[in-house]
Amino acid sequence: MDARLRALCDLMVPTARESVGRHEYDGVVQDLSPDGVRRALARLAPAGAHPYPDPHDEAQASAAEHAARVALGDLALHRANPLHHVGNLDLACYDREYAPAGERAAARRAHLAAWPDAVDAAVEALDRVPAPVAAATLSAARGLAGQVRDDDGAAGRAALAAHGRLVAHLERAARDGHPETALGGTALAALLSSAEALPVDLTALAALADAERDRMRALLSEACDRIAPGVSTSDTVAALLADHPDIDGVLTEARALTAEVIAWTAERGLMPYDDGECRVGPAPESRRWAMAMMAWAAPYEADSPSWYHVTPPEPDWPAAEREEWLAVFSRTSLPAITVHEVAPGHFSHGRALRRAPSAVRRTLIGESFVEGWAHYAEEMALEEGFHADDPRFAAGVALEALVRVVRLSAAIGLHTGAMTVAEAAARFTADAYLQGPAALAEAYRGTFDPTYGRYTWGKLAILDLRERARRAWGAGFSLPRLHAALLALGSPPLGLLDTAVERG
């Protein structure tokens, strides 16, 4: 890596190691203490220094540097969001078969041995954690303990003792921390603008979210009318979500759908690459806050299986909680989730990232494009006829989209002070058909993940770009051409998507 990318990777060690595949970071924890972050920010290239010859690469690197200065410098999010530190401790990345088992085991041991120092840095840094954020992230922090094994010996005992200090610190914050979680409108706009290399008008973005909500509710209503004519949409949705596999069947159905979406995407030539292996299995314990997620074979590592992690509920949970969790994997929702996570979504995107034509594009991963691409893939698959004879797929696409669009509305409302957590939860119930704990969990996620509207924002940006490409390319437009041009950019900020039209 050149010095500019090295300085950026030093500020995103867990991402560089796992999503980018820079395994020189194996066994390394990031110094997330206040002084450590200040030193790392100081190593970023000054504006205009050492420019890349490709204008797109220069713009993408400059945007990443600016975004880091805003998120970790101006806003100091590592001092308010415990998940920065949970990700720094996470050992699950060594379970994937990207290198010989002995190498991965040695890296895991080194990483585990660094837990005490990393926890000391975390306790020092986490001095601005709002009580609701501490409470909402405690389960993820506690889950790290499950990664320590009985045979880890003295290092494991030291790691668990350190882990206990982190959990105790968050428990105190949950009990005694200040109640205010809002960043403020100015800070939220700066965070979003810097990450995506474009100016953000929060009022306009909120209006865009409302329009998309209305569009998706119309799609859902139409699909439900096809499924159960004369029955209310809410009653039909309830019946659809109740039709799900049991705990053992979730993984079985996810595996069958994975094979189906990969074959369907390849048959239609929708993506520039259709190679690689995608396995399906439960998520590591520390990541079971995510019901489904993709761990792809990263750009800078030898090819290996990617993992579509699907997390069924635990058998010993109360029956009502098991039922609520399993409803996420209904036969209406699971096909759309699998398109999102596998093909033409994250897994397919990961295959293209491995061939991105520059180090900048293989290294700097914009989350709004990553999630926006996978969310776009759901609607694009519907348009292209996936499960065309089953209106449940359209309903599933609409239901998934409604959750994502309410996230965008909630993020803006929560962080401008226009919405309370209770009001955000009520929006998830009214607009996205989530009930009780599920709606409340989504609302609380917005308190510590102010960019979680990136799914809808990214999807809409890609749909807008598609229309610009249609106009610019005329008869030469096709989805494969557009997708190849977009994915040649890697995972760009949304403000740089036009490069695909200019160069495609």
Image: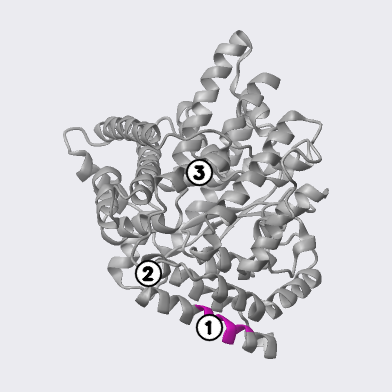
Along the viewing direction, whichever of 327 and 216 lies nearer the viewer: 216
Q: Where are the magenta residues, as a range?
A: 159-166
Question: Which circle's residue, 2 or 3, is located before the other in the chain?
Answer: 2
Q: Name the residue under label 2.
A: 131
Would residue 306 be found to the left or right of residue 4 on screen? left
173, above or below 347, in the image: below
Would residue 468 be found to the left or right of residue 151 on screen? left
Answer few, some or many: residues within 10 Å of disc 3's Cα (few below 14, many 20 plus, some between 14 and 19).
some
Name the mark on residue 190. 3
Q: Mark 1 points at which residue?
A: 165
Question: Which circle's residue, 2 or 1, is located before the other in the chain?
Answer: 2
Q: In which quarter of the image is residue 36?
A: bottom right
SS of the residue at dot 1? Answer: helix
Along the viewing direction, whichever of 461 and 274 lies nearer the viewer: 461
User: Hey, what amino acid is under mark 1?
Assistant: Arg
Would residue 463 be found to the left or right of residue 407 on screen? right
404 in magenta: no
Q: How many labels does the image show?
A: 3
* Residue at position x 73%, y 35% in the image: 58
User: Hey, what amino acid is under mark 3?
Assistant: Ala
* Residue at position x 35%, y 61% in the image: 180
Q: Name the quarter where the C terminus is drawn.
A: top right
197, above or below 107, in the image: above
Q: Where is residue 332 in the image (x, y as percent from the top left)?
A: 37, 44
Name the mark on residue 254. none
Please name which of the two marks, 2 or 3, marks the residue nearer to the observer.
3
Please name which of the two marks, 1 or 3, marks the residue nearer to the observer.
3
